[in-house]
Amino acid sequence: MRYEHWTKIDDGAEGAWAADIWLSALRIISRHEGESIYDADSPIYVELEKEIPELTWRSFEGDSFRPYFRDFSKPWTIPNVASFETTFKVTEIGQELLKGSVSELEFWIKFLSRYQEGTDFPFVELSCAFLKTDKSLTLDEVYWGVVRSFRTENNDQLVFNDLPNEVIPSTAKRRLTLMLQLMERTGAILKIGNGSKQRWKQWDRKTLNKLIKKAINSEIGRSQYSAINKPFLLLAGISGTGKTRFVREQAKTAGQFTETYCLTSVRPDWHEPSDLLGYISRLAKDGKAEYITTDVLQFIAKAWRAIADSGLTVAVQESKDLGKRLVVSGERDVLEQVLPYWLCLDEMNLAPVEQYFSDYLSVLETREWCWTGDSFTYNSDALLKPATIKEVADKEKLREALGFDNSENKNYDELWQLVCQYGLGIPFNLLVAGTVNMDETTHGFSRKVIDRALSFDFGAFFPNDYHDFFTSTSCNKRLSYPIWSNASKADLANTFDADGAKTVAFLSAVNAVLKNTPFELAYRALNELLLAVASSQPQDDLTLKAGWDDFMMCKVLPRIEGDTDKLTTSDGKALLLELSTVLANQLAPIWLASETDEANQRPDLYREKIVADGATDEEKVLRIPCRSKAKLQWMSERLASATFTSFWP
């Protein structure tokens, strides 16, 4: 079965998910908050039995009392409207629903769009299926044609011919019927007919799109995301380690894979930005200018449309220094709902990155976030310049190619007019990840590229353990886009380095070794290290130094390469040895921690343990040895044996 994890809905609790029963029970629970669920004489059970006699709310086995909520609490705990640890309690979300501050329709759309089973989002998949077909579907067609055969991430086509002539398993039939009834509750689909003639059809495309586009996992705060302070990643490693798959899996966590993922294979003949972002052509018969778009430019436009759909404001603001610019503004809680859009540039260095990627690298440094409390503004320079758009003769054709032609969405009309006037910049929700193999067929990276990226030695950050092939013991954390461009003390206030002094001292010590070498660090390096600390919000010494360790791996060591002469300081000392000496002091105790010394090992900021449900955050922490120590040792041994070394494997 394709969606074998779709099991929690109505798992043994037949009928409790029915919307009327569910809501009536929630109202009764709210009137009896604080009462013990194991009090057989509680008036709540009398009231439940009177108003909802369809379910058995309490039963006795000899002297043992068995409340319904002991075994069948999921209809209220999964949507997070009530809890039943020892007493009855309605959560804040449940209270908002009962008070009417959140409508029942809004609640169900929000819940169904974010409901997750394993790695799947069942209601999102069902919504995608109904949007792809205009025909009404029987339960057999939904089960065999959608549940068993369709998956949006694989761009599957819906096929309803030659369906198996088999009876749907009774449990699956019951659960799937209930799922369709819950979708019907939102008005997205409509049931027609009864009995053997019962079918479901799409009814409201806007609601179906809401079920797809609503952000997932509202309970995940940004503090639970792994630290990331740059929207440009280089994933370097030997072939077959899973670099491209890593990006795919990151995009899949959003539950909207086809919407938020774009794979572009870099060609060896790319030598200018037009290969990536498109170009003006005058080859038409009338000689008029036409803009030839690319998948990458279309994907960038799609990320902008997601921002327009989110409820954030996209408008023109005037700056004293920069003049009128296209600015995104809004509140933190709305920003938290905007999904990351992943652009994967596969085999990125088959062509010279500095040439075809130069426009992006330049504009990347113009991104500017400004925070005032929980309110923000964001802007960047344009990738697609307004002067270029002005040259285009048929702007409607370009508008259609970039997806801004949806007549039902006025936001797109306004956004397109602004794009024509001020250009198309880098959307804040765009993450670019380039996969990299370093061999004789590829190009190296200049320090300009390395300075603007987070470089991951994939084998060090996401190692392949053959023993975990069948049963993994760890998983990758979910990455999201950065929400800062310049570090401030306010961003560090609640961290273990509240004023940034420890971090400044660390980088100063490192830079003292690199002084008067080609690898010396500038202002940008300190800003990005402070941003890394702000992103990860470390609360103890080991976590703070884990961030420093990763910064050495992502930003400092990738810049270092050369022969023995180049890697000797001005006073004749070995650069790598001097750097190791400084780091041994600055990164203590994690520098000396062995593989068995878990108490002094650093936490992994990008992976965590796979643990049972209900485990604490501390139990999820994966402890690992110091990364930069192992890399420096490897680089030193390579220099000794080959008289040349670099960071890249």
Image (cartoon, helix red, strand yellow):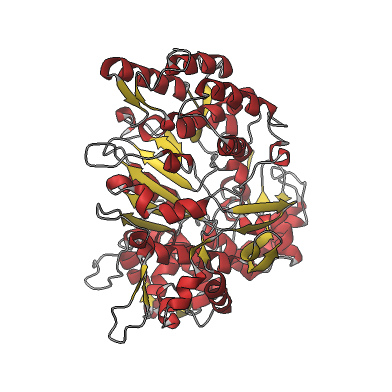
In this picture, residue 606 sits left or right of residue 271? right
Q: Residue at x 39, y 17 (%)?
A: 633
Q: Residue at x 26, y 19 (%)?
A: 642
In this picture, residue 515 sits left or right of residue 574? right
Q: Residue placed farthest to the bottom in the image? A: 286
Let me know if residue 1 appears in the view.
no
Picture coordinates of residue 569, whole percent (x, y)? 46, 18
In this picture, residue 256 sits left or right of residue 240? right
Does 446 sit above or below residue 577? below
Picture coordinates of residue 435, whole percent (x, y)? 34, 44
Give 573 or 403, whichever is nearer the viewer.
Answer: 573
Q: Give the number of marks.
A: 0
Let me know if residue 584 appears in the view.
yes
Quarter containing the C terminus = top left
Q: Residue at x 31, y 20 (%)?
A: 638
Give 473 or 572, whichever is nearer the viewer.
Answer: 572
In this picture, residue 334 sits left or right of residue 186? right
Give 411 or 415, whichever is nearer the viewer.
Answer: 415
Q: Residue at x 55, y 39 (%)?
A: 227
Q: Quadrant of residue 576?
A: top left
Does 153 sit above or below residue 385? above
Does 205 sit above or below residue 552? below
Picture coordinates of residue 211, whole percent (x, y)? 52, 66
Give 468 or 549, whichever is nearer the viewer.
Answer: 549
Picture coordinates of residue 466, whole percent (x, y)? 29, 29
Q: Quadrant of residue 122?
A: bottom left
